[in-house]
Amino acid sequence: MADHFSGPRAICDPASDIADVYAFPSPERPGNLVLVLNTFPASAPTSLFSDAITYRFRVRPVTPGSESAAAAFTVGEDEYSFDFTFDAPQRLDGPDTTVQMGTCRAPGGRQVAFQVGNEVPTEAEGLKIFAGSRLDPFFIGFVGVTVTEATEKLGFRSDASNVLEGLNVLSIVLEVDAAVLGPAAGSLVSVVGETMTSGGRPVRLERMGRPEIKNVVMSPKKFDTVNSVWRSATSSTRKTPSACGPTMRAPTAHGSMPTWPSTTAWTARPLGRWTSWVLTR
């Protein structure tokens, strides 16, 4: 899932901007889940994490629904959060050496300290951690996106250029034993990445668990003239993951979502009463 430069807030505070969230089974350790949170798109190789932000993974067990069920799946109530915070960088052994330390707070309150940029991941019971600068793994042919939006037909080419080629992100990689996620965790989980202010009352700055929804799906104005002035990027960030009500889902469905299936081969479940919802009612 990728969503770079997603709205005015993220552009003004790029350290809080979530570029990518990935989740996949570990290819090396069966029974382990790998979580990746990439932030600060287009950062310099020497960039470091903010000491004023909490970077968070939120994981919940998911139960698949039946073919006749109203929902494709049900998200469980149990939640397992992994919070990453970072100290202010310290200069050691001369002016050219900067070291930043971080802390991972796992479910149950256990804390694991690690050093940013250490190529040898930090390992603790059931956890494996890396944090540091990496090449941005996402590929997007921006010309194809604009052509698809303008023509409402797929405009992507096999020889497209990646506008993110050569750019860096600050990456947090967590490998976790499924046992850490509790007895309810099965073969399917939901994963959300968040950035929040640290200290005092926490304020969510960015959340991401969906691919280019704000930039590609929700931003175009021509598909929904009624809600075209609504600041969807900021509003969607405020909603709590796994608990977004119809006031969030409905405008998205009413606006851009019905148009995009015409450019693809996907099949979606019926949207029901939300297909006719507008914010001005």
Image: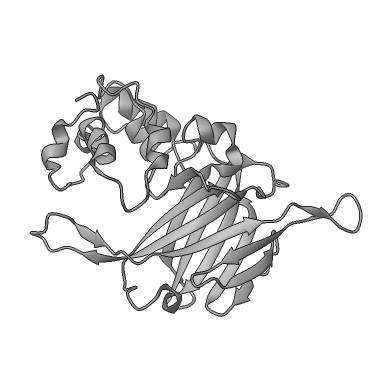
Is 33 in front, or is 49? 49
Q: Can residue 121 be seen by looking at this rendering?
A: no
Q: Position of residue 202 (x, y in %)?
A: 53, 48
Residue 129 relative to residue 30: left or right? right
Q: Residue at x 67, y 68 (%)?
A: 113
Q: Is residue 201 above or below residue 151?
A: below
Q: Residue at x 35, y 67 (%)?
A: 78
Residue 253 relative to residue 121: left or right? left
Q: Position of residue 44 (x, y in %)?
A: 69, 42
Q: Is residue 166 above or below residue 115?
A: above
Residue 170 relative to residue 244: left or right? right
Residue closest to the far front: 200
Q: Position of residue 223 (x, y in %)?
A: 25, 24
Q: Quadrant of residue 185?
A: bottom left
Q: Is residue 173 above or below residue 183?
A: above
Q: How is the image coloured?
A: one colour
Q: Residue at x 36, y 64 (%)?
A: 60
Is 222 in front, or is 87? 87
Q: Can residue 80 be seen by looking at this rendering?
A: yes
Residue 260 relative to residue 137: left or right? left
Q: Residue at x 46, y 53 (%)?
A: 193
Is 154 in front, or is 220? 220
Q: Quadrant of the C terminus?
A: top left
